[in-house]
Image (spheres, rainbow, N blue to C red):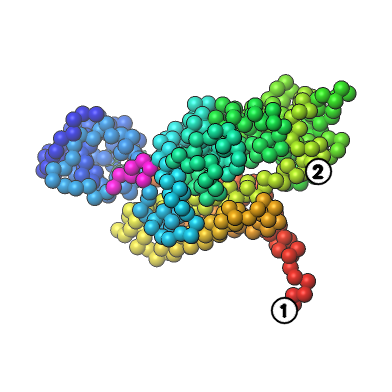
Amino acid sequence: MPQLKSFTREEVKRHANEDDLWIIIDTEVYDMSRFVDMHPGGAFPILEYAGKDATEAFYGLHRQEVLTKYNRYKIGTIEGEKPKIEFRQPGALSKVPYAEPNAWQGFKSPYFKESHYKFRTAVRVIMDGLAEEAREFEVSGERPSDEFQQKMGSHGLLAANIGPGKFLKEFNIQLPGGIAPEEYDYFHEMIVHQEARWGTRGLDDGLIGGMTISLPTVLNFGRPALKQKIVPEVLAGRKRIALAITEPYVGSDVANLKTTAKLTPDGKHYIVNGVKKWITTGHWADYFSTAVRTEKGISMLLIERSEGLETKPIKTSYSPSAGTAYITYENVKVPVENLLGKEGGGFQVIMSNFNHERWVMLAGATMGGRLAVEECFKWAMQRKVFNKRLIDQPVIRNKLAKMIASVESVHSWVENLTYQMCNMTYMEQALKLAGPLALCKYQTTRMLHDVSDDACQIFGGRAITKTGMGRNIETLQRTYKFTSILGGSEEIMADLGVRQAMKNFPKDARL
Ligand code: HEM
């Protein structure tokens, strides 16, 4: 970058033709002479601002990050003037009201201790440092690279997604912010899910989604030797793992799955045949925690990618970088030692992680809604139409009010449920939390539906454009159905919640 100089506004005015074209954005001076013909928006819009202040026009059409990416054209600043627009620094919190959970914006919280604040600060710095690379994978739809997966692992961010547990100490995991493994609780984990503010819904699942739902089956039900082999390599990002339950004929209806595993006559192996569909991370995975039908009923097997096992990508409306796969198993030979839990005990293995899986989705989804609030609020404040800012239109303020109120309500419920998870025993959680978590998941994805709809109307055409100002809104509207179908569809969640409440309904209660 050339040495930055100081200029007066009068000096800038003298560089006002196509071959010598300067503009001012806030208090910075850009020499556009070499860029004007390459400008993605064409030369015409820039020419109008030659030698002038283009701040308002620029922010009406570009995200701030454009200036960071093209800062090679910056030649100086305006003498004696202080910037009016703040540049977001890596790791910084947003000052936009409701853009962050209120605990991070100075509100009192009964839930967070010093270690949570410390952890959040550390996680945001790491995530900001990885954001650009993450977005490149989401846009290209490519497999997140081994280096990227391993960076996540080396920061402790893969293990941090699996939740608190003895395994953090057992496998010597170094958590962000130097948090001690025994201190790590579900509020720390909630922070990890909510700090994934990259706007890369597909990639998030390709990187960690499959692992978060499948590794616990090995951690909690795998034989010690299997655990020792697989857990460290997955948590370090050297290997990837997916949960393979759903089939083309059965989605949530696990009891009717058709994939079979037959014991060989010597009793040393299972031979697996069948197909699986919608397997998140599946196309990238080395291991598959797979639900099969054995002689004794539904069982879970850890299957390594090997002869007879093939994956192919499913073209989804979210992102190919989620690695969503169709899997075929043709006479795949699996050692009996890879049985997870008991033969015929597959339901227990599958069910044991459902609450956690749904809660992870809730935490991530509230962040998705919040990000939309921040984007819409900023856009409405800076976008001018009919000579007014969007925010000056009551209809826009009303939409924002609805968005904020629904994100905040769901977020408070998620925090309350997280508190229960931190303080109930595993058995208590199993008995009491399935219903509320299911209802909260239902409410959260309804919230996303409404927020996405309002956000799209606020952003207009940019909400259906993959790059530029509305990029994150486009991602939200294209991907929120992912959350409302996976891990139990809205309809099943709503029904489960009410059926569980019916079980606890007092027999003697009358209106
Ligand atoms: C440092 C100065 C500038 C840089 C680096 C820059 C860069 C860019 C880039 C990268 C895009 C594509 C954005 C996307 O698709 O996400 C773009 C679009 C555009 N730019 Fe600029 N630009 C600059 C200044 C300006 C100025 C002063 C104007 C004047 C109004 C302008 C008008 C536009 C327009 C109209 C578009 C198309 C926006 C759209 O498709 O909605 N640009 N610019």
* Image quadrant where residue 417 sits: bottom right
The residue lying at 68 percent from left, 39 percent from top is: 220
Q: Amino acid at mark 1?
A: Leu
Residue named by callout 1: 511
Is residue 163 left or right of 404 when viewed as pictured? Answer: right
Q: Secondary structure at mark 1?
A: loop
Is residue 330 left or right of 491 when viewed as pictured? Answer: right
Q: Amino acid at mark 2?
A: Asn
Q: Is residue 24 magenta?
A: no
Distance from disc 1 to disc 2, alpha carbons, whole Å, reads 40 Å
- Mark in the foreground, 1 or 2: 1
Residue 466 in view in this figure: no
**Where in the figure is residue 265, as x and y percent of width and height?**
88, 23
The residue lying at 33 percent from left, 49 percent from top is: 60
Q: Neighbour class for label 1 at 10 Å: few (<14), some, many (≥20)?
A: few
Residue segment shown in magenta = 86-92
* Image quadrant where residue 440 sits: bottom right
